[in-house]
Image: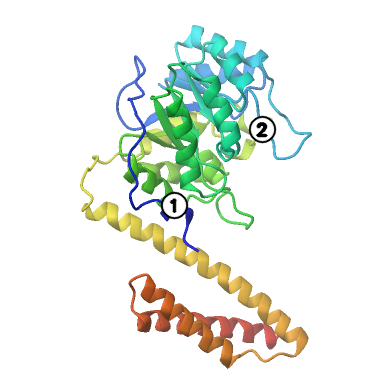
């Protein structure tokens, strides 16, 4: 089945009315940086982190006030009390402030507390009912809203959520790429699947796209390379989790960096000149690299399944090579390849090599 991000490429239109997200005193250059702790924990922690970030030149401070947790019992945010701390950040540092909203009540409280920006999380953007509720709550409000991609890799769902907000009059829209959930263990907490935000950029070239390396990586050592990759792919900005004492953080400690570390990461970034040409060889080669990465990951997944089959065959006395199945795979894949404008012979060669490796791995299991 084709990925969801392919479904509406044909006859897609830029139907959203978009205006730039401009904030006084924030330079209009890449990358736009939003930073702050995963969660607002205490007033002292919020102020200390904000003060350090302000000294590093960060203009927009983020902190989670309401925290959606996978399971009950964890820290779910301080709630409305924390909005007062955000107001203090604004007053004492001059930074803009932003937090996540997931319900109409959150919107009401955040607007009352004079938040400068709002963002919508991945769990919320996956739910059209929730997105419509937020759109209704924001009807007629002029505030920038950033929308994280849904937890599942569905570009249409991501766009649909933003369209709901746009229909409610929100024109200062932006997207946040935070990766996509997977049940498998990977190097990343959430798989980047960069081709999806790149397709979003193709359809909506005027829509600002920020990268959330904290949630993609899940580990602070991955933040720097992910930031650079986002810049190489021409993302507009970064939203990074930064905490004055990250190892003591009440949520997502492993993916937060100190303000000093963030400053170093930003200083080391190479910001290349923006290109508007779809023929730019460097950008096209980066897309090839991303495709190759995905192919390797899918092949690794296939080999894991092949090894499980090998274990089953060993336990049940079944031969490794199954001629009927082999021929079926080659014929079916050749036909699929031709439907996708590739040579059937090419596809047969590819799957002959894949089958050979699968057999090799199964034989290792049989002979153990």
Instruction: Establish if 54 lies above or below 358.
Output: above
Could you tell me which secondary element the residue under label 1 belongs to? Answer: helix
Quarter of the image where one finds residue 31: top left
Q: Residue at x 44, y 61 (%)?
A: 293
Between 138 and 59, the one lying in front of the other is: 138
Instruction: Classify 10 Å Cα crowding around label 2: few (below 14), some (14-19), many (20 and above).
Output: some
Q: Which residue is mark 1?
A: 5
Is residue 232 placed above or below 141 in the rendered structure?
below
How is the structure coloured here?
rainbow
Q: CA distance from mark 2 to mark 1?
A: 26 Å
Residue drawn at 30 percent across, 58 percent down? 285
Q: Quadrant of the C terminus?
A: bottom right
Of residues 111 and 355, which is closer to you in this image? 111
Residue highlighted by disc 2: 68
Q: Nearer the viewer, mark 2 or mark 1?
A: 1
Residue 104, horizontal then vertical, whole percent: 61, 22
The spot of residue 355 in percent (x, y) is 52, 83
Judged from the image, the secondary structure of the residue bearing numbered disc 2 is loop
Q: Is residue 24 left or right of residue 189?
A: left
Name the quadrant containing residue 87.
Answer: top right
Q: Is residue 216 left or right of residue 143?
A: right
């Amino acid at each position: 089945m084709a990925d969801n991000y392919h479904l509406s490429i044909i006859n897609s239109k830029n139907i959203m009315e978009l205006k730039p997200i401009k904030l006084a005193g924030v330079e209009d250059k890449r990358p736009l940086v939003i930073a702050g702790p995963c969660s607002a924990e205490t007033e002292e922690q919020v102020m200390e982190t904000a003060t350090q970030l302000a000294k590093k030149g960060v203009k927009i401070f983020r902190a989670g006030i309401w925290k959606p947790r996978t399971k009950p019992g964890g820290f779910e945010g301080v709630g409305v009390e924390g909005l007062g701390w955000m107001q203090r950040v604004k007053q004492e540092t001059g930074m803009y402030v932003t937090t996540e909203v997931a319900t109409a009540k959150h919107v009401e409280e955040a607007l009352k507390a004079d938040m400068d920006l709002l963002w919508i999380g991945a769990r919320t953007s996956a739910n059209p009912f929730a997105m419509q509720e937020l759109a209704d709550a924001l009807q007629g409000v002029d505030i920038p809203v950033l929308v994280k991609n849904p937890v599942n890799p569905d570009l249409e769902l991501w766009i649909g959520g933003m369209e709901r907000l746009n229909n409610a009059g929100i024109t200062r829209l932006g997207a946040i790429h935070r990766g996509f959930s997977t049940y498998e263990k990977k190097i990343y907490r959430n798989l980047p699947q960069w081709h999806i935000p790149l397709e979003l950029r193709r359809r909506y070239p005027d829509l600002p796209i920020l990268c959330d390396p904290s949630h993609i990586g899940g580990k602070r050592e991955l933040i720097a390379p992910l930031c650079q990759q986002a810049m190489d792919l021409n993302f507009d900005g970064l939203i990074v989790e930064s905490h004055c004492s990250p190892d003591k953080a009440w949520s997502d400690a492993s993916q937060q960096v100190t303000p000093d570390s963030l400053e170093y990461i930003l200083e080391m970034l190479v910001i290349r000149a923006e290109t508007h040409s779809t023929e730019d060889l460097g950008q096209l080669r980066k897309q090839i690299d991303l495709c190759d990465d995905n192919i390797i990951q899918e092949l690794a997944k296939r080999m894991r399944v092949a090894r499980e089959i090998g274990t089953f065959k060993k336990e049940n006395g079944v031969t490794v090579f199954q001629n009927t199945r082999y021929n079926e795979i080659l014929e079916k894949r050749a036909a699929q390849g031709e439907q996708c404008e590739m040579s059937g012979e090419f596809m047969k060669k590819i799957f002959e090599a894949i089958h050979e490796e699968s057999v090799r791995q199964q034989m290792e299991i049989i002979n153990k």
